[in-house]
Amino acid sequence: MRNRLKVQRAERDWTQADLAAALEVSRQTINAIEKEKFDPSLPLAFKTVRLFELSIEDIFKDNAK
Amino acid sequence: MKSIIEAIACKGLPARDIKNANIVNLWALAWAVSLGLISFLSKYQWYSPGFPTILAFTVQTGIGIGMLLAYIRLLKNLDEMERKIQLDALALSVGVTVVAFASYSILDKSGIVPDLKSSSLIAFMALTYMAGIVFGRIRYR
């Protein structure tokens, strides 16, 4: 799964640690998601888009598309 | 090398997870020390069968249950990626140990290698689990 998490985070001038604290995960998890090494679960993906006030498609994209 | 050291040191994990991991480590240390002490006393017949054996069994099992409960609490509090790393490491540990010791038992029965010992099994599982944790942390860096 592809994502635009790093771009969205940078636009808000948040650090990985800021985002990790807001989502209650480790900074490593944010780093792994941004590098597309780890796909978040649906609850974490929804929590992320709620935080950014965006829709799922704005951040996460299916590889098949 | 740096990434391996950082993986072992749990660098970047939240303080809560490090605290929970340290509690598990303390339980594991207490469990290993009590097991070693009881084995030592048993080897030199420093305690007789009966009440001392029941006491040793109860203490060892109690510490073991404490260790398991601490590990469950650690798993429940970890975030989803760290939990995946832990569960992958456990799966690797169980899988590799079952395959390795099944193969070893063939050599054991033919007398090529020494008898299987439960301590070897525990040490092998612990080592493969630790290797799995380090591998997982490096993989998701």
Image (cartoon, helix red, strand yellow):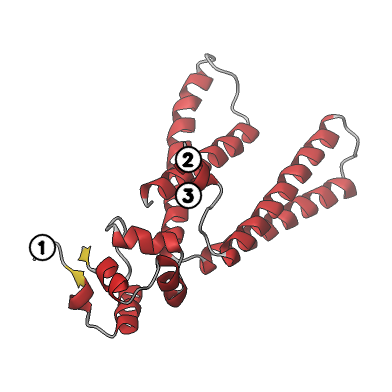
Q: Residue furthest left?
A: A65
> In the rendered view, would you say B105 is above or below B28?
above
Q: Quadrant of residue B46?
A: top right
The residue sitting at 43% across, 42% down in the picture is B95
Residue toward you, B25 or B106 = B25
Q: What residue sits right under mark 2 in the picture?
A: B2
User: What is the C-alpha distance between the residues marked 3 and 1?
Assistant: 32 Å
Q: Are marks 2 and 1 in contact (CB under 8 Å)?
A: no
* A24 over B104 or under it: above or below: below
List the residue tagged with mark 1: A64
Amino acid of disc 3: Leu
Badge 3 and badge 1 in a common chain: no
Query: Where in the figure is residue A32, as x and y percent of width and height?
Result: 35, 58
Residue A65, by quadrant, is bottom left
Disc assigned to residue A53: none
Can residue B107 be seen from the camera position used here?
Answer: yes
Residue placed at 52% from the left, 60% from the top? B13
Relative image position of residue A61 (x, y in whole percent):
17, 69
